[in-house]
Image (cartoon, grey):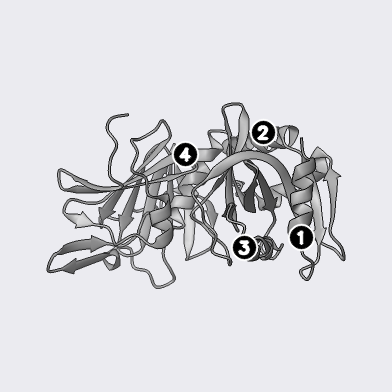
């Protein structure tokens, strides 16, 4: 779709920041004559210089003019800190706090399929300097992750709370809730000099070209692993506490019971949720699942590599 672009470019005085996550172009446009902050290390890893592909989430940043979502239907809420609301096909996210005024914080609005989004920012996100105005990363976490969740839910994709690595061009993912040992496992591979890690906390799985692909994401865990790479998903291993290293096969139902708590499911969106559940079932029909028992004091790298060698 057109010529390749720099991930940060100006067009009619509108600055665009282009990143690519799991093959999805996340294209953020800033207000006229407003620039973004310098990218962090992880943002630089996911910056994209290529032309736009077929999967695009365009996000427009707007200074002020905060939408009033008070009349929208509440889908899910944590009280004063944030809430997701619905108005027809539109969704809205209000981010703030107990003392946040109506003109501050962030308000994101998007279509249910995440094909278009806007983010309105309070004055605290705008810094005016002698050389121009700068706006903070208002389209970053958690807005970017939430928009990806909605986008994937409509397109046979899942955001999985998992570590992931690549061995012989095949990906393994290790799903689990916080404290399951994902970052600890990733550190063992890092200590052995293993370079082909995808993430220690968030993996995206997509059905592409007839196979399930596992992608690294910008959302790292305690080990700080966030790699912009992907590979065909060969196996799913669920970490479990044990006294020795043991890998045993799981049937699809047992695997589903363990997978669901580790998926970013849209439980508040019944129509999208049904598609997510179908995607989970398709995933477990096509990719073998196992329990990986181990103790934090036990080395598991050699056992995992030997397991991969036995995979077909």
Q: Earlier in the sequence, mark 2 or mark 3?
A: 3
**Mark 1 packing: few (<14 Cα in 10 Å), some, or many (20+)?**
many
Whether the residues at callouts 4 and 1 have beta carbons within 8 Å, the answer is: no
**Residue farthest to the front?**
193
What separation in Å lies between label 4 and label 1 (alpha carbons)? 31 Å
What separation in Å lies between label 1 and label 3 (alpha carbons)? 12 Å
What separation in Å lies between label 2 and label 3 (alpha carbons)? 34 Å
Picture disc at residue 190: 3
Picture disc at residue 300: 1
Q: Earlier in the sequence, mark 4 or mark 2?
A: 4
Depth-wise, is mark 4 or mark 1 nearer the camera? 1
The residue that appears at 47% across and 66% down in the rendered structure is: 80
Q: Earlier in the sequence, mark 4 or mark 1?
A: 4
Q: Earlier in the sequence, mark 1 or mark 3?
A: 3
Residue 234: x and y in percent read: 69, 39
Is 307 displayed left or right of 14 in the figure?
A: right
Residue 200 seen in the current view: yes
Picture disc at residue 248: none
Residue marked by disc 4: 23
**Mark 4 packing: few (<14 Cα in 10 Å), some, or many (20+)?**
some
Is 261 displayed left or right of 10 in the figure?
A: right
The residue that appears at 52% across and 64% down in the rendered structure is: 79
The residue that appears at 47% across and 65% down in the rendered structure is: 81
Depth-wise, is mark 2 or mark 3 nearer the camera? 3
Task: Specify the quadrant that holds the N terminus.
Answer: top left
Is 277 displayed left or right of 288 in the figure?
A: left
């Amino acid at each position: 779709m057109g010529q390749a672009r720099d991930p940060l470019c100006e067009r009619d005085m509108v600055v665009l920041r282009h990143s690519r996550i799991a093959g999805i172009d996340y294209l953020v446009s800033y207000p006229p004559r407003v620039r973004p902050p310098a990218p962090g290390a992880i943002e630089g890893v996911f910056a994209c210089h290529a032309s736009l592909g077929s999967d695009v989430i365009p996000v427009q940043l707007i200074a002020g003019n905060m939408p009033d979502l008070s009349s929208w239907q509440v889908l899910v809420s944590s009280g004063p800190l944030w809430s997701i609301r619905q108005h027809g096909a539109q969704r809205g996210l209000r981010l703030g706090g107990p003392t946040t005024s109506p003109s501050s914080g962030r308000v994101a609005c998007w279509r249910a399929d995440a094909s278009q989004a806007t983010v309105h920012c309070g004055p605290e996100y705008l810094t005016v300097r002698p050389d121009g105005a700068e706006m903070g990363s208002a389209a970053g976490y958690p807005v970017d992750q939430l928009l990806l969740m909605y986008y994937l839910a409509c397109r046979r994709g899942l955001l999985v709370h998992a570590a992931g690595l690549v061995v012989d061009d095949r990906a393994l993912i290790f799903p689990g809730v916080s404290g399951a040992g994902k970052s600890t496992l990733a550190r063992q591979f890092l200590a052995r000099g293993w370079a082909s890690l995808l993430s220690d906390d968030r993996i995206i799985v997509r059905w592409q070209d007839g196979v399930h692909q596992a992608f690294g994401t910008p959302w790292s865990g305690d080990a700080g692993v966030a790699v912009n790479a992907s590979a065909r998903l060969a196996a799913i291993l669920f970490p479990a506490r044990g006294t020795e290293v043991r890998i045993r096969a799981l049937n699809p139902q047992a695997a589903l019971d363990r997978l669901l708590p580790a998926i970013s499911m849209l439980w508040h969106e019944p129509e999208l949720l049904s598609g997510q559940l179908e995607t989970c079932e398709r995933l477990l029909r096509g990719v073998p699942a196992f329990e990986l028992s181990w103790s934090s004091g036990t080395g598991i790298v050699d056992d995992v590599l030997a397991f991969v060698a036995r995979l077909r």
